Image (cartoon, rainbow, N blue to C red):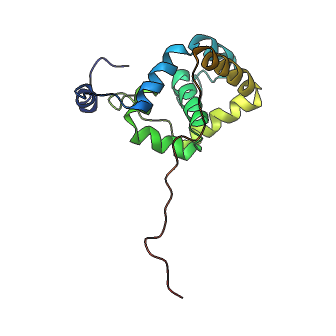
Amino acid sequence: MDSRRSFTDIEYSMRKQTGKREELLLRLDAIMPWEELTGFIKPYYPSGRRGRPVKPLDVMLKMYLLQRWFGLSAAGMESQAYDSYAFRKFIGVSFLEEQIPDANTLSRFRRLLKKNGLEEKIDGTVDAAITEAGIKLTPGSVVEPFIRPLRKKSK
């Protein structure tokens, strides 16, 4: 990540308090065995030598985990990553350098994990780290936005 700070980073650094979601994500980031987790995926992850440039593996893995932990669809994860400073900070994406991977990229990453039998391996390792740290996660803590009509149509 670039050493330059965005206006959002400066503004958030002036807060008197950190939000509960951000505190949880900081704890989870600290306890995750990132090298082990990325090591499972590296042999299957595209190198980027041909075709479109690939997103950093750690960014994709963190978005995958957020998607699982918060019960989000790929589109919901993309939206939350743009809307939530805590999510962007956890993911490690700064708009000064790059953009959030889109829903299609997230879906392709999840298919890559599933095709190579990595979901169970990753989930088991993550669950063990969370349990060992004494953290209890309940998926679906962030509800995806939905559109509801403002008024019911009269019959």
Report the front residue among 83 and 46: 83
Instruction: Give the residue at x 74% y 25%.
Output: 120
Against 117, residue 140 (above or below) is below
Against 69, residue 40 (above or below) is above
Indicate the quadrant where residue 15 lies. top left
Indicate the quadrant where residue 71 lies. top right
Report the front residue among 69 and 6: 69
Q: Position of residue 93 (x, y in %)?
A: 41, 28
Q: Position of residue 81 (x, y in %)?
A: 45, 38
Instruction: Give the residue at x 38% y 19%.
Output: 1
Look at the image and tell me whether residue 71 can be seen.
yes
Indicate the quadrant where residue 127 lies. top right
| The C terminus - image quarter | bottom right
Instruction: Give the residue at x 46% y 45%.
Output: 79
Q: Position of residue 44 (x, y in %)?
A: 69, 21
Report the front residue among 30 and 83: 30
